[in-house]
Amino acid sequence: MTATAYPPSYYAATAHEAPERPPLDGDVSCDVCVIGAGYTGLSTALHLAKKGRRVVVIEAERVGWGASGRNGGQLHSGQRRDQETLEAWFGEARAHALFELAEEAKRTVKSLIATHAIDCDWRDGLIHAVHKKSWLHSANAEVEHLMARYGYEGTSFLDAEALTRAIGTDVYHGGWRDGTAGHLHPLNYALGLARACEEAGVRICEGTRATAIESDGGGHRRVVTPTGAIASPDVVIAANGYLEGLERDVDAHVMPIRNYVLATEPLGHRASRLIPFREAVADSRFVVHYWRISSDGRMIFGGGETYGRTEPKDLKGFVRAHMLKVYPDLADVAIDYAWGGTLAVTMNRMPYFRRLRPGVYTASGYSGHGVAIATFAGKLLAEAIEGDTSRFDLMASIPAKTFPGGRWLRHPTLVLAMSWFALRDRLG
């Protein structure tokens, strides 16, 4: 089996040259086998290799082929859920600890980019735009809470007029700027992590799908693939929305959904008029609209989700309709690229970290917050495998509900729930 080509996207078209890594050929052994070469798997491998571990990463397709190479490229602050929600769920002490982990996640991404000279168009700055006037007070209170109770710096409030100047549209009611967040080229970031892994001694096998994880009950595990098996004391499942039935426990807690993005033609001088300081932007909808200007002056806009395996027939038109709600003046602009990808969500929108059984670990379900948290998950997984489970256990202690309906009905149940929230967005 050979690895497939990357799905068409702006990111694939502008990716740095990368070697096509051969699939596994025969049986091998290592200290840790990682399943999945996205941010979680690559970060896990890199952090373990720096500790001297022999690591083999297997990937069913190509490095960064899934959500890691197709996402909006936005690096956010904090966890996926706001701190007041986490305080209500877990108490202040635990909420503070989760916030500190999330902030270290952000720093970890920036550190990896700098340490390994990853050329991925990193740029500081992210703006949050509030789409309902009635939500503005609570949004501002949330930021004030972060500053007062968490000592969070780097944010500034934007009233409606200031926000319009910052993002070139007047359809929002206010928001705030986060100078410590930012954005990047997601596929080039993944490719950079893979290069760093191989420089540290990691073996990456593309076109190699895991079909089973076997255990003899005595501390030995064996990851089975169509072209060989990997014997390893520890296994990390880092397949996120592409698990394909490999692990029932993760399947029950983590649901794949599809999200869509477009890239316009280069906008020339119009790009600077839209977002003069080139921050990324994300709004307050449940089904989030998110966008930014690329390094070559294109609008990269994400909007719309589907919950099956098929994507809209007119993908460009599907995402363009969302973009024109925010920027009607871009109606005359050509859409050069449009693509979809599978990400994974959980019931509570917090990531799913677990030690499934002795020697088998997983982290996934980042619910749209994966650039930071998926990368940091690899660091925590490596720590746990090395014997320090404290920070991994903090993330793993977050309660997780299974999706209702069992194997056959959980998907239509999710569709009903997500459709309701999408309707609420439209009614707002």
Image (cartoon, rainbow, N blue to C red):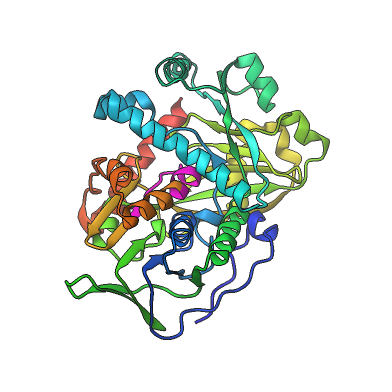
Does residue 280 appear anywhere in the picture? yes
Q: Is residue 285 left or right of residue 230?
A: right
Which image quadrant for residue 170? top right
Q: Nearer the viewer, residue 235 or 169?
A: 235
- Residue occupying the far bottom of the picture: 26
Q: Tell me which residue sits at (32%, 29%) in the image.
A: 95
Q: Residue furthest left?
A: 217
Left or right: residue 47 compared with residue 85: right
Count of residue discs: 0
State the image quarter where residue 313 is shown. bottom right
Residue 209 sits in quarter: bottom left
Q: Is residue 23 above or below residue 43?
A: below
Tell which residue pokes out farthest to the right in this image: 269
Residue 255 visible somewhere in the drawing: no
Q: Residue at x 55, y 73 (%)?
A: 4
On screen, residue 56 versus residue 192, left or right, reads: left
* Magenta span includes 361: no
Towards the viewer: 323 or 148: 148
Instruction: Residue at 30% x, 54% y: name it.
Output: 387
**Which region shows up in magenta?**
362-375
Which residue is at 30% across, 58% downward?
361
Task: Name the spot of residue 329 as percent of width and height, x first.
Answer: 72, 32
Question: Where residue 29 appears, x then y in whole percent?
Answer: 37, 78
Q: Is residue 366 magenta?
A: yes
Residue 258 at x, y percent in the picture: 46, 52
Q: Nearer the viewer, residue 103 or 227?
A: 103
